[in-house]
Amino acid sequence: MTHKRPFLFLLTIPVVAILALATFIFGGQALSDSGRDDEIRQALAAELGASGEIDLKNLQEVQYGYGVCGLYRTDDSENGYASFFYDTSADRLTLDITSRRYQSHCSLSAVC
């Protein structure tokens, strides 16, 4: 005796499996980016001695994801945004835009 499985059953399992896998992959990436932003905020707060909220803007991954360039601003800052470079592999923060590390990873010439 042969049993015929319904078409819906044969279609639902693969679709649900693909959606679950996509959620796992892209959800993990979103959580990873959120955790990275928190690491950058903690490094900036430690470096600046700031206790207020730190706003990050224009984050860009460099060095194939091993570094992040961007802008930051603290709540108590009277100036606008300032630039930074964060090395994710060494957990090192660079705030000096004239330094060699910042220039080699975040300057316009490094992009071109």
Image (cartoon, rainbow, N blue to C red):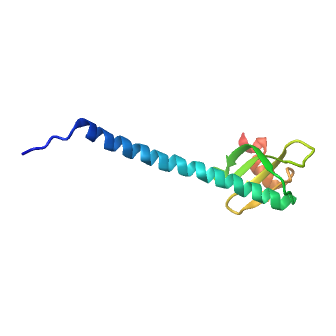
Q: Quadrant of residue 79?
A: top right
The residue sitting at 30% across, 38% down in the picture is 11
The residue sitting at 87% across, 60% down in the picture is 49
Quadrant (top left, top right, bottom left, bottom right) of the C terminus: top right
Of the pair 18 and 51, the residue shown nearer to us: 51
> Which percent across, then down, holds residue 61?
67, 47
Q: How many marks?
A: 0
The residue sitting at 59% across, 48% down in the picture is 30
With 31 as the anchor, is 23 left or right in this view? left
With 16 as the anchor, is 27 left or right in this view? right
> Which percent across, then down, holds residue 6?
22, 38
Of the pair 65 and 3, the residue shown nearer to us: 3
The answer to whether 103 is drawn above or below residue 112 in the figure is below
> Which percent across, then down, holds residue 85?
77, 52
Quadrant (top left, top right, bottom left, bottom right) of the N terminus: top left
Residue 59 seen from this side: yes
Q: Quadrant of residue 100?
A: bottom right
Residue 66 seen from this side: no
Q: Residue furthest top?
A: 7
The answer to whether 70 is drawn above or below residue 94 in the figure is above
> Which percent across, then down, holds residue 110?
74, 45
The residue sitting at 72% across, 45% down in the picture is 59
The answer to whether 84 is drawn above or below residue 11 in the figure is below
With 10 as the anchor, is 69 left or right in this view? right
Q: Residue furthest left?
A: 1
